Image: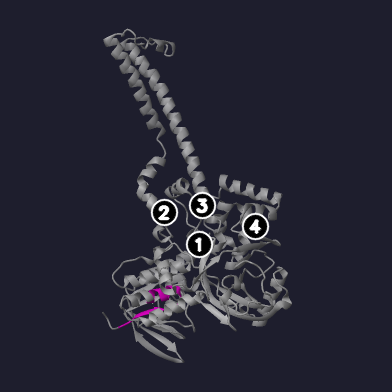
Amino acid sequence: MSDKPVVIIGAGPAGLTAAYESVRQGTRTIVFESADKVGGIARTESYKDYCFDVGGHRFFTKIEKVDELWREVLGEDFLKVPRMSRIYYNGRFYNYPLRLFNALFNLGILESILIVLSYLRSQIWPQPEEETFEQWVSNRFGQRLYETFFKTYTEKVWGIPCDQIRADWAAQRIRGLSLTSAVYNALFGVKKAATLIDEFDYPSKGPGMMWRRFQEAVEEGEGRVLLNSEVIRLKHENGRIISVTYAEDGKTAEMPVEHLISSTAITTLIRMLEPKAPEEVLEAARNLTYRAFIIAVLIIDKKDLFPDQWIYIHSPNARVGRIQNFKNWSAAMVPDPDKTSVGMEYFCNEGDELWTMSEDELTDIASGELAELGLAEKEDVIDKVVLRQPKAYPVYDHDYSKHLGIIREYLETFENLQTIGRNGMHRYNNQDHSMLTGLMAAQNLSGEDHNLWTVNEEEEYLEEDKTKAKLRELIPEKDLIRAFSRMDKLGFATAIGLVSGLLFFLATIWLVIRGTIPGIPDLAFLADYFPGYTLTVDGAFIAFGYTFFWGFLFGWLFAYIRNLFIAIYLYHAKKRAELVSLRDFIDHF
């Protein structure tokens, strides 16, 4: 093994998971983190012992490897938290996930009817193309429900019109269902979607507690996690990264590299390369964009405000996008049980009006909006703090896939470089998928051959349910496909006609040769139904013609009706399963 270390840039969930696995393999590992604490956007910050989660991170996954890591590292320090979240729209609170009678009551009968009609129209006459987020959602919910519950909030989050957001983002976050998935769901019951859960795990002192434990485990394994250490340059030659230059305590130093795993923003990675990347790659990096995030934490002199962990604010009149109530995630997040802390979350671009506001200006807006929403009085706010998070969300604008493709193609020329995590891959992964990319990248160092770009894309990485896997063993997929495949009407009808015709042809010929047998009815009665039929060789051919015709007709009608009912059944099964997975759509933002 080389004396040169494996270098990991970034100590977020992806980077720390890669470091943990690398150290476990006995590899010399060094992690560089520019911030003063680990966790990245999933870290926990604190202010006067009030802890707050930057963005809200539940711990729930069906990826067994990731769940095992969580239990292995954090142990018994998980809380079981009952989920509670709502949507605020047009002066009313809606249960989330949406519930029929609550939504009907809040919307009113007329608006509910219009939404249903809009939905039916989208199912009968869907938009032929799904290139944009607006088209993708409207085809599944109807235009009116899209405008009611998705348009305003989505445009708050991303800062661009929904007709400029690529459908790829929605398709990645909410996977489509195959025919076989729909049938398994219909036959064996549709389960809740991945994030549609009644309770979830949460570290008692916030998600940062998990990442600090990862940091401790890495260091106990003789790995190093260097905080306040920013990588500023990556030297390369002959298709290999050979060294990193980093800044620490006002000084710079250079370190040789055996292998580099990067979770820093892919655009930043491109700019750090020396010699410089080709101009077309640099141009592609300049055209990939990110959405920034501001959280204004308000300390409220009230014991209780509202029961939710978070509320989505869909009102276009409020700039806040989401409100966290940290006490409802874990009581240990708030040091004084008679106080409450809330996080007013704003989405913006670096350098825009919101981003450049002073702390007092931001908290004044946040306090005012909290009061306008009827959640607390402005004078109840006794303290506040603001945190800004750059590059929080990779933007899926119209041309992002083209630019990302150019960058990926170039980075693949480096034999000892892997990119992981949300920003490292410019993919809006959840923390469990980000961790999986880190785990797989570290495993690649020991000779495995994982394609990291398939995470959150292929079914085996999409939280495949074990029960369904067992059902697939009992009922092989090929048998299921055969059973529900369309029946060939012409082929089936011809077969039925031939069998019927031959049956009566041979029966008539047999009676012609053997003669009638006393006590056993002959086929002479067929003359009442088949004009011209007689118990002769000519009659046998007449019987064949009649029975072939009626058998063909029956077979064709049977196959047609069977195909129609199967098509209706499969459509219903797929729509039912798809709607279950879409009920928690906003959580995927």
Of tags 4 and 2, the one toward the viewer is 2
**Label 2, on which residue?**
467
**Label 1, on which residue?**
169
Compare marks 3 and 1 and give the one earlier in the sequence. Answer: 1
Q: Quadrant of residue 264?
A: bottom left
Of tags 3 and 1, the one toward the viewer is 3
In the rendered structure, which amino acid carries the disc numbered 4?
A: Thr
Q: Please rate how many residues cluster around mark 2, counting C-alpha atoms within 10 Å: few if below 14, some from 14 to 19, many from 20.
A: few
Q: Quadrant of residue 257?
A: bottom left
Q: What numbered label is drawn on residue 148?
A: 4
Q: Nearer the viewer, residue 271 or 33?
A: 33
Q: Residue 498 colored magenta?
A: no
Extent of the magenta region: 4-19
Q: Does 48 appear above or below 81?
A: below
Q: Please rate how many residues cluster around mark 3, counting C-alpha atoms within 10 Å: few if below 14, some from 14 to 19, many from 20.
A: some
SS for dot 4: helix
SS for dot 1: helix
**Label 3, on which residue?**
578
Q: Is residue 349 visible?
A: no
Compare marks 4 and 1 and give the one earlier in the sequence. Answer: 4
